[in-house]
Amino acid sequence: MKDFGYTIIKQRTIDYDQFDGRLLNEILEMEPSFKTCLSCGGCTATCSAADLVSFNVRRMNLLLRRGETIELESEIKKCMLCGKCQLVCPRGINLRNVIMLIKKSILKYKPVNS
Amino acid sequence: MSASIRVIRYNPCNQEKKKMKHIVIIGGGIAGMETASALTDAGHWVTVIEKEAQIGGKLNQWSYLFPDFMPADQIKSALQEKYHERDFSILHQSEVRSLHRHNGQFNIETSDEQQLKADAIVVATGYELFDARRKEEYGYKIYDHVITSADLEQLLLPDGDLTVAAGKEPKRIAFVHCVGSRDEKSGNHYCSKVCCITGVKQAIELKKRLPEAEIYCFYMDLRMYGKHFEELYREAQEKYDIQFIRGRLSEASEKIDKSLLIKAEDTLSGRPLKMNVDLLVLLIGMEAGKGTSAAAATCGIGCEESGFLKTADAFLKSNFSQQEGIFLAGSCTAPMSINDTILHARSAAMEVDHWLKSRCDNEKM
């Protein structure tokens, strides 16, 4: 078939109605402190990995809450599990545990066609 | 509340009162009533001019108060009790028509044609709620299930009906912060201060009534300035699973099933977001309102750009207008919570008392 150079662009809008909250609910149940995130970014500021590669711990919360499972899976691989984020967090969220829990559960909820 | 109507005609011939200083308070809301009680206690003769048939002002529109869910009735009863225990008068359904200075006193004429003489005036005319119809893109009074925080307050009473289309309970509810506040297009550049915590309080109350519902708050900043406010916000997140999304709604549109499609930017993700909700609550802000601008005109005192009354300074003279003998109390000066209003009213009473006494001393000398 002739390639006319046209392509279908995936919509950037977050369609909340399509959001699958199962992974989020599982994580929040196991680590309820994660509910209290203020999105202050203290975690990202101190992050050892963020200093070297493009990685944003604060965004883990957002990716999880918006159902961005695929991106979440590739992002958390960058975490070195040093735990400095928890020391900085004004609400004492156990972020290290959150990342561990996501790593454990994410395969169950990853969309099949990805 | 007919119990609060104890109409006492202004009677300047009372010999005992003739010796006292007479203070006229414009407005019988929280600020006016609290100032009146405190000034009566200080030994003055006080008359409150209230435009409505009942006291309490905007307090009558709220059911439960932040941050501890105290029934608003309790504050109203306390104000009424103070009134019944004291000897001051309220002229109900009356407004100040004119005010003139004469020989160091004020001559006041009311809308019901009473003539009063006063040694000092306290303006306590309060605020009005932002008319959400002015923010047309949110569809208040156009779409069925867009309501304001004041509407919701009535629905939060035990017999309030929270069902939406076809008698169903709402499954997803969104709150919009800063409606008519921090919005120059609406004509209001200032922050109304109390809507953030009102939203948190109402979201918790809704979640208690509808445990299955998902609740979202769309905010620009969350300004939890008061005692226990931050704690309540944390409780909303932790205990009640209220979700806070940073971004201002651009618009709402009604679908055929009467649910609403809302659009905002999820500013922390940097992407547009759309969501379908069954009920949309607009957290409306405070405006100076007609009562306050009318009082400013009659008393010849200045307004800020926001429409609220100008205080002589921001620190030490927050109860002084720029006119001698005319004092200010409560939310006619700026958006204010009930607890701040009570404190501002008490400090107004103290300033008036001090001013009257120092004037007496000067006269004696």
Image (spheres, rainbow, N blue to C red):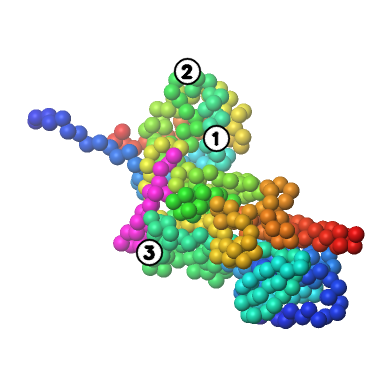
Residue drawn 34% across and 42% down?
A13
Cα gap from disc 1 to disc 2, whole angstroms: 21 Å
Q: Around disc 1, counting alpha carbons within 10 Å, would you say few (fewer than 14), some (14 to 19), or many (20 or more)?
A: few
Q: In which quarter of the image is residue A111?
A: top left
Residue drawn 51% across and 52% down?
B188
| Residue B256 among magenta residues | yes
B178 on left or right of B44: left
Amino acid at circle 2: Leu
The answer for which chain carries disc 3 is: B
Say if B198 sits above or below B89 in the image: above
State which quarter of the image contains the N terminus of chain A.
top left
Cα gap from disc 1 to disc 3, whole angstroms: 37 Å
Q: Mark 3 points at which residue?
A: B142
Query: Which of pointers 1 and 3 indicates the residue nearer the eye?
Result: 3
Q: Mark 1 points at which residue?
A: A40
Q: Mark 2 points at which residue?
A: A52
B262 on left or right of B75: left
The answer for which chain carries disc 2 is: A
Q: Do labels 3 and 2 share a chain?
A: no
The residue nearer to you, when weighing B202 against B227, is B227
Amino acid at circle 3: Ile
Q: Are marks 1 and 3 on the same chain?
A: no
Across and down, in percent, residue B91 comes to 68, 76
Query: Which of pointers 3 and 2 indicates the residue nearer the eye?
Result: 3
Q: What stretch is highlighted in magenta?
A: B249-267
Across and down, in percent, residue B314 comes to 68, 47
Q: Quadrant of residue B205?
A: bottom right
